[in-house]
Amino acid sequence: QAPSVGDPYLLTVDPVSGGPLGDAPVVYPHEGRELRFADPKTLEAFKADPAKYLPVIDRQMIAQQMPFYPLDTCMISGDKLGGDMGKAVDLVYKNRLVRFCCPDCVKDFNKDPAPYIAKLNEAAIARQGPGYPLTACVVSGDKLGGDMGKPVDVVAGNRLVRFCCPDCIKDFNKDPAKFLKILDDAAKKKAGEAEPAKPGDAAGEPEGGRVYACPMHPEA
């Protein structure tokens, strides 16, 4: 097996059993992409019939990455995704979702994927950078842009992850799901702080105003 390249395996489930990967997954490079399994038994099941499980993995990765996909146009043709060409074509290339306007553009992509992946990275950084929810490195906890210098931007699964230094990228790749959860939790917290309070929220009141109850007749 050739060493894996591309994005790390970001799913939290075993592609064969559907169960959690656990704390010590088996990392397996398959055709240049990293896959992870809960134990050697499920890995052997995958090896026996990869064609059965790869579509399942791809569907899960597409669903996971779709909310973060940074482009609404095809990188090859420039045409709008889901426009006159019909439904977009979704491809998982070495664990990265890439979207096209038509099958012909997939062929052009496969001739030389590297510049298009670089373009996708640039788009993700430009789109997600301004609202990035953390001010510290997701791995070390050190302040981004502090003593370590300019943050290191990495795109994994079409998601921007910022590190204080290149060494932290290695730790991230060992257990990406763990660190993405930290990023997710920070994003949810930031989104919650940005939402305007609903009527009654500030005082702990139900929507529509305060409800008064007679202490002698609470049913009234």
Image: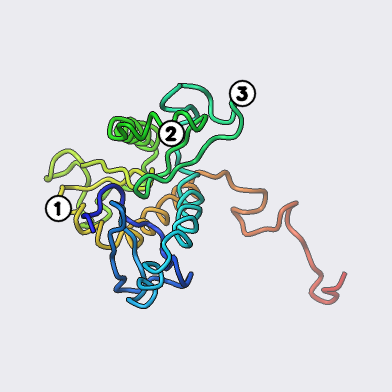
> Contact (CB < 8 A) between labels 2 and 3?
no
Q: Residue at x 42, y 43 (%)?
A: 97
Q: Earlier in the sequence, mark 2 or mark 3?
A: 3
Q: Is 5 above or below relative to 149?
A: below
The residue that mark 3 highlights is: 84
Query: Which secondary structure, mark 1?
Result: helix
Q: How is the image coloured?
A: rainbow
Q: Is 167 above or below relative to 112?
A: below
Q: Amino acid at mark 2?
A: Val
How far separated are the C-alphas under marks 2 and 3? 17 Å
Query: How busy is the neighbourhood of tag 1: few (under 14 within 10 Å), some, or many (20 plus)?
Result: few
Query: How busy is the neighbourhood of tag 3: few (under 14 within 10 Å), some, or many (20 plus)?
Result: few
Q: Amino acid at mark 1?
A: Asp
The residue that mark 1 highlights is: 167
Q: Earlier in the sequence, mark 1 or mark 2?
A: 2
Image mark count: 3
The N terminus lies in quadrant = bottom left
